[in-house]
Amino acid sequence: MIRLIRRRLAVAVPVLFATSVGMFVLGAASPNDPAAQYAGAAAFTASPENLAQIRANWGVDDPLPVQYLRWLGNLAQGDLGWSTSRHQAVAEVIGARAGWTLLLIGVTLLVVLAGSLLVGTIAAYRRGGLFDRGVRAAAYAVESMPVFWLALAAIAVFALGLGWFPAGGLTDVRATGTGVGDVAHHLVLPVAVLAISQAPWFLLFVRDSVADSLRDDHVLAARARGLPGRTVLFGHALRTALLPYLTLIGTHLPELVGGSVLVETVFSLPGLGAVSVQAALGSDFPLLAAITLITTAVVLAANLVTDLAYSAADPRVRVDG
């Protein structure tokens, strides 16, 4: 495991470096003026001298390598820069909103894992039957639906039509705080939409893996010994299929993060996803660069944890790469 961690770190450093360089190149290619963005509406009446002074204070007219090295130095000191669109420190923006995004992704992942394991295992046990065919047809249909379309459909049906859940936000407009019950009620639709959009890959993977495991010798031997069908299914076949399932979690985490951006935007949730969209529309390079770098680091860390869990679950497996 120590060797695996070292190899992953050796890959992570150049990946993060390339990501940061790419963000700087894209930021330099943008035609937007950071000084005008910072000034906002006042930029229309500000004198060219004042705008030039803002650029000089920020050093945006310096050569790109100089700007990049200065940004790296500030990053090493924990300074992520200043958000031009929100007019506050980038670290404050991320710190105030990262928890809500982690909550959305964490709850969604738990729902997806539990649901796909249960439904996929039952579909494999009844493979070829009506339940199995219905589950696979639904999974293939959901795969073709964009997550933002699912979100809008959920709002139209369950929020506007039936009135069961709020259409957006994190708390009621009359609430004076963030109560657990109020937040949970507002998160039902976002979590359901994000979970449904990600479930097909996990569900179909579990279904196929368990179906293959049911034909393994040790499972057939358990059946021959007269063990109950539930014990054979969950105690033998599912346990064999769980190891590859760990790898799937790590590989699909970036897609889950990307889906959360759209879900947060549609449901007006105060997470990093909605902030990322606003930063992109406002060409807020410091905020975009920090969010991109942090997201890349989180994905790399999740892949490392997945590999460690895989090797810990089966010491016979040697994880390379």
Image (cartoon, rainbow, N blue to C red):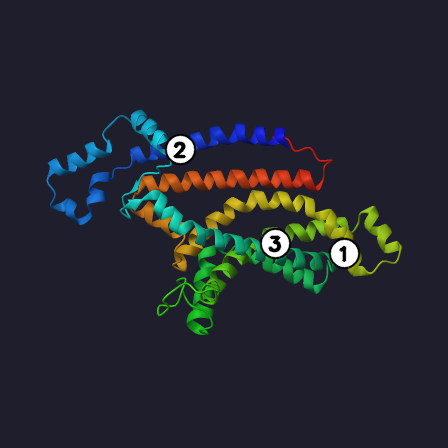
Q: Count neighbours of disc 3 (C-alpha within 10 A) and say few if under 14, some if 14 to 19, many if 20 or more.
A: some
Q: Neighbour class for label 1 at 10 Å: few (<14), some, many (≥20)?
A: many
Instruction: State the SS at label 3.
Output: helix
Q: Earlier in the sequence, mark 2 or mark 3?
A: 2
Residue under numbered circle 1: 233
Instruction: Kindly state the secondary structure of the residue where label 1 is placed.
Output: helix
Q: Residue at x 53, y 46 (%)?
A: 253
Amino acid tagged 1: Leu
Query: Residue beneath label 2, please?
Result: 20
**Labels 2 and 3 touching (C-beta < 8 A):** no
Q: Which mark is residue 81?
A: none
Q: Residue at x 35, y 37 (%)?
A: 79
Q: Is residue 33 visible?
A: no
Residue named by callout 3: 113
Q: Is 161 positioned to the left or the right of 68 in the image?
A: right
Image spot of residue 86 (x, y percent): 29, 48
The answer to whether 312 is drawn above or below residue 134 in the figure is above
Relative vertical location of residue 13 with respect to residue 149 in this rendering, above or below? above
Q: Residue at x 36, y 67 (%)?
A: 176
Q: Nearer the viewer, residue 314 or 30?
A: 314
How much space separates mark 2 and mark 1, taking CA atoms? 47 Å
